[in-house]
Amino acid sequence: MTMQSLLFRLTRARGEEMTASLWSFVYFFALLAGYYVLRPIRDEMAVQVGQARLQELFTAVFLTMLVVAPVFGALTARFPRKRLLPWIYGFLVANLGCFWLIFSTTGQQNVQVGATFFVWVSVVNLFAVSVFWSLMADLFDTAQAKRLYGFIAAGGTAGALAGPSLTALFVTVVGVRSMLLVSAAFLALCIVAITRLRAWAERTGATGSARDDAPLGGSMWAGIIDAVRSPYLLGICLFLFGYTLLSTLLYFQQTELVPAAIKDSAERTRLFALVDVAVNVLALLLQLFAFGAMMERLGTTFTLAALPAVAIAGFATLALSPTLATLVVFGVLRRAGEYAISKPARETLFNILPPEQKYKAKNVIDTLVHRTGDTASSWIFAGLRSAGFSLTAMSWIAVPISAMWLGIAVFLGRAAQERPAAPVDAHAVASH
């Protein structure tokens, strides 16, 4: 078997799609590698800030998202996507340069610096990834997405595997602030990939190339309005809210169980990095060899419902055995399932939408709705802890929430199958 035939088999690409598939792979690889270089550093700073203040951090992230969402809507309304996306990533590279200077001056042990960095990473992660998937929805139609998204998502997983591996290997040698420059280099590579993908779209006449040189127009609040008004988009909001609610609950349990089991800061950072490696090895295998088959043979409904089913079993097990080992195993399975199965399946739901909703409404869902779930669950967790609820009790509470999440997944999957072809007019989608 030649290398070319192997690539076509892995990517499921056809003809000219190969170029776009490979550059999309590179783009997502660089994006998540850059993020995952930073993630273990962010998690260690969360431990330093302390569990008692985590709900304050999540609230700060949420408030930042309230500002970012309409600002992004205004930018997409005014500037062509062809120019806007590279500018966004260039701005993020500049931000990392600023943090490098701050860390050089104050050090990363400063609580206020750590809190600011936590908020920045949490906002940028969702925002940058949302922009990536908006571009994918712009370039590919639904049929292409079902074939190509598994391989493209594998690029992100490979990057998410490379990022923490680099941090685990070098953070104790070169220091935290040097790792920021590594992350900045990966984000710069994203700009190259965006440029190449836009060139491919113009050459082939891909789905989103027609209006690439023109601003999307519309209101800066259009994304929020559409997300609330459209039953289809509202269903996606509820599905994502369920995921974030349970994810934050698990994250808070991590901040209690990990410090109790491991006292050394460097060892905790190493554990976080090794967990990221395990998550992404499993996710990579699932993306390359399972996602496409699940979508083709079992359908969207089953694929969306898989992760909620894992959550039901995982939280029940954690309630019966609230140990670090249980937390790590459940966390690995859950995160790998999100990256490899649930996330790519959820992204195919956006391909049928018009360009304005692919960027504005999608960005609102991926950022503001996501962090609303984080913020709400952080305060819920803090309230339950202050009321005397144990980790075991909260795990049992998560089980029926997971069951409701499963119901939303089934409803949304069936709605997606019954939904007609994409209308041209954005208001037709909102009123469907």
Image (cartoon, grey):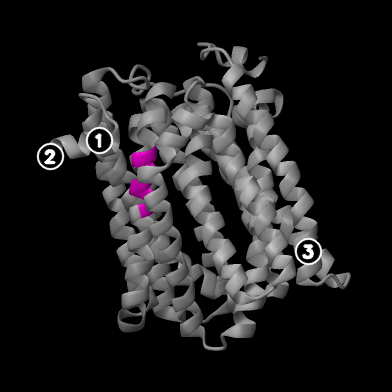
Q: CA distance from mark 3 to mark 1?
A: 45 Å
Q: Is residue 80 above or below residue 186?
A: above
Residue tagged by mark 1?
9
Residue 305, position as x, y percentages in the image: 61, 39
Residue 190, position as x, y percentages in the image: 31, 47
Main secondary structure of the magenta stretch? helix
Type of residue at label 3?
Met
- Quadrant for the N terminus, please: top left
Marked residue nearer the N-terminal end (3 or 2): 2
- The residue closer to the viewer here, 378 or 343, is 343
Marked residue nearer the N-terminal end (1 or 2): 2
Q: Which label was assigned to residue 275?
A: none
Which stretch did the figure color magenta?
A: 150-157
- Look at discs 3 and 2 and give the one toward the viewer: 2
Asked whether the viewer can see residue 90, the reply is: no
Q: Is residue 172 above or below residue 130?
A: below
